[in-house]
Image: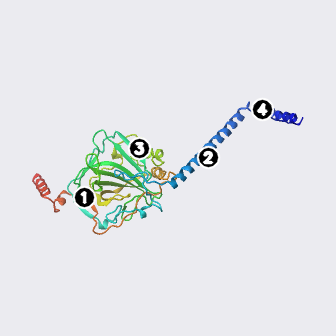
Amino acid sequence: MVECSLCSLMSFFGSSLYNIVSTALEYPIVVFLLSLTIAAIIISNVQTARMICDFGNAAKNNFNITPRPSSSNSLGNLGNNFDYGADRGPHTWRCSESNQSPINIIDEYVQKFPIRELLTWNHYDDLPAAVIIENNGHTVVLRACFSGNTPTLNGADLLASYTFVELCFRWSALNSEGSEHMVNYRKFPLELQAMHRTGPSGDCTSSYDILIVAYFFEISASNLYLDPVIQHLHRIQRPGAKIEIQPFPLTYLCHQFRTGFYSYGGSLTEPPCYQGAEWFIFPEPLAISERQLYEFRQILCSDGKTRIVRNARPVQSISRSRVVNLNQYNPIGACNMPESSVCEENCAGDEFMD
């Protein structure tokens, strides 16, 4: 008797609930609100599952840290066991103590150096077959592939032709810093570094074959030449992300200066900080807007969670015996310097032509 009464009660409640739901579903607003509720529940469950997976992966990484081998052909690679924080920052890097980069360039100690030839930029106006940008966990790296001639640099006082390899960017969360190099104790919000190497393909094993051309950027108007890269930075926010973008000439990023630039012998600015790299630095800052700089500041570092708030090595000590040149085109002055008889013959030829 009791069981029959209980069954009747459950049947009554079930029938009542069914009638209520059936009646409510006849009103569109109720269907809409019910759909929103179901969608919210599904999204909440997906987010919870993702958080659980991320937590598990983070815990696994904390217990299994395995450094990956680095490549000698790039300025920095995802997985290198270094960063710019308190635990693995520049103060912990094991590097040589001499001829290191970056430096503070002080005009008072710069030596004016006459160059007989202008710096020559070859094929930088050519359109690449492909342009690839990558977040390597430390910076944004850009590489270009060419179906024809690869861009090269020669002239000035260079003893060989240097082939373009890649370029990267240095920035900070503050407008008062970001660049690696300083000029008269001043830092800039962003520094672009274009690496070159000798040889037809730029493939060499020694840092003594490296030339790095650096540019400063300061807050100003929007720089349209940066947009082909900046408009895609949101697609490589996570470390390890690599995409191909619409090709554009490298002259958009590499201003083709020919004279009036600093040069000195230094090193790579990331571990293992090999010595022997030659640096060319264009002293006049280029323009970048707050909006454009903001996109760089959204890039995530190698942990995949925090943004890159700094990726510049501090300036290194420089002895008075270390020479920083301000290269200025002056063929007559260059020939007055102690050089080989080739220069003397060229100068004699110039006098005859005059």
User: Marks 3 and 2, how far apart in space?
Assistant: 37 Å
Tell which circle, 2 or 1, labels the residue nearer the N-terminal end.
2
**N-terminal label among 1 and 4:** 4
Q: Quadrant of residue 250?
A: top left
**Circle nearer the N terminus (2, 4):** 4
For discs 1 and 4, the disc positioned in front in the rendered view: 4
Which tag is nearer the camera, tag 3 or tag 2?
2
Disc 3 designates what residue? 228
Q: Which residue is mark 2?
A: 48
Horizontal and vertical percent position of residue 119:
25, 52
Task: From the top left corner, tell me how far across and down residue 76 is, in percent.
Answer: 39, 53
On residue 261, the disc is none
| Residues tagged 1 and 4 counted as in contact (Cβ below 8 A) | no
Query: Which element type, helix, strand or loop, lies under badge 4?
Result: helix
Asked if 131 appears above or below 338 in the picture, the reply is above
Q: Which residue is mark 1?
A: 328
Residue that appears at 67% across and 36% down: 35
Q: Secondary structure at mark 1?
A: strand
| Above-or-below relation of 144 to 139 | above
- Contact? badges 3 and 2 (CB < 8 Å): no
How many angstroms separate mark 4 from mark 3 (CA)? 59 Å
Residue beneath disc 4 = 18
